[in-house]
Image: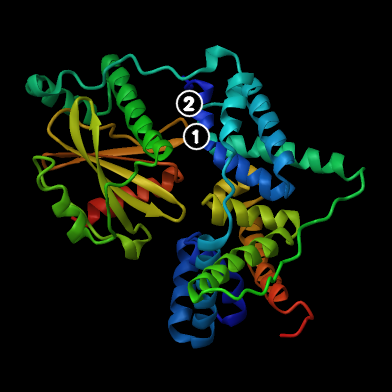
Amino acid sequence: MNCPDVRPLLSAHLDEELDVVNDAAVASHLENCPTCAAAALALADQRRRRQEKLTRHRAPAELAAQIRAALPPASRVTSAAVPWWPGWSRAVPLAAGMALALLAGFSWGGNRARANALAGELTAAHVRARLTGHVIDVASSDRHTVKPWFANKVDFAPFVPDLAAQGFPLAGGRLERLGGRTVATLVYSRRQHSIDLHVWSGGPAPVAAPVRRDGYALVGWRSGDLNYSAVSDVAPEELAAFASLFQAAR
Amino acid sequence: MTPPFEQSMLPHLDAAYNLARWLLRNEADARDSVQEAYLRAFKAYDRFRGGDGRAWLLTIVRNVCYSQLRRAQRTPAPEEFDELQHTPMNDTPDAVARLGRELDTARLDAALAALPMEMREVIVLHELEGLAYKEIAAVAGIPLGTVMSRLARARLRLQREVRAQIFPEGKT
């Protein structure tokens, strides 16, 4: 690739939206062409400045109420009736059996309902945190700050890899209470979005297959004794990429 | 099974409002359009299959805004946006630095407001709302390649507008 080929692709390259082949070609050109590399830096700098400075208008406070008032009551929020956690502390053998079944792909109906309830609760936690502004208890992009913060709060040590170079910088962590259990939640950023990664020890495994729920993407996996469930409003493919990177970082 | 309407759509209210506010460049119109979009979304909700709720809603918001603009074109166009007010200050250095930062926002906002609609919307959707190219393609109803080239051009144009804000005489 030469300069005239590369220039129109720089913008998409910075956004990590190019296909693999073109992206590699652009990257290798940038290594050898100081002029294009400078142009890429300028573009990145301008984008960062805009993201920091441009006004993101927030809906006036009364607008949600006005919209709600105009809708019939049947559309109102209902809480999930199916408990996704079957009495966590006293149900370990049962839970372990179920974990295998869950990982095997939810072949039976009860599990599907429970997985649905889990997906609902994880999504609700993600939305609730953003509505109340309680997204992060410990704000740091340094994993050596975030990991020890959990030390006295949960009975396991969550694995906190640094994925900034891959486009998922760490933003911090918080504690969640899910299914009557304390869950360590790592928060990673992706552009203007954030990803909640809930980590808990023991109990049934998280929703294994990627799913979408209320416009949010979910993906879960199990590693060692720990269960992981990631929830975000990024595109499902991006969340899947995050999950692979996280697991590969082990 | 799709979740209740409010649960899946109200979390995207800020995104809906921000898009409408930037497309219409006017608070009252943005508010009306968002409200209308939510009502339309509610009526069409049985056709929503539980995919990307935000992109689905933003598509409707965008359609409502475009209709609103087409209606408005029949009436005399209002002032597009306020000129930057460079008020001279004799204040503490702190206040001056703070004003500098706020002016920076005003300047960038004005530059974005001056972009043609189809460029403005890709910038808002990508840089402010963080939509992936694929989602923008769905919202704006254009091919992925168009999203890519339009966003690249919009960024260059925006940078020119910023420069024009700083050097209104056309000097560089």
Q: Position of residue B23 (x, y in %)?
A: 71, 48
Q: Position of residue B167 (x, y in %)?
A: 72, 79
Residue B168 position (above or below residue B109): below
B17 or A218, which is in the foreground? Answer: B17
Q: Which residue is mark 1?
A: B11
Q: Which residue is mark 2?
A: B7
How many numbered circles are shown?
2
Q: What type is the residue that disc 2 sits on?
A: Gln
Report the Cα–Cα distance between label 2 and label 1. Answer: 7 Å
Residues tagged 2 and 1 counted as in contact (Cβ below 8 A): yes
Residue A61 - label: none
Residue drawn at 36 percent across, 38 percent down: A129
Residue drawn at 68 percent across, 70 percent down: B87
The image's colouring method is: rainbow
Disc 2 with disc 1 on a shared chain: yes
B104 or B163, which is in the foreground? Answer: B104
- Residue B138 visible somewhere in the drawing: no
Q: Chain of mark 2?
A: B
Q: Residues within 10 Å of mark 2 (few under 14, many from 20)?
A: some
Q: Chain of mark 1?
A: B
Q: Residues within 10 Å of mark 1 (few under 14, many from 20)?
A: some
> Dot 1 lies on which element?
helix
A153 or A1, which is in the foreground? Answer: A153
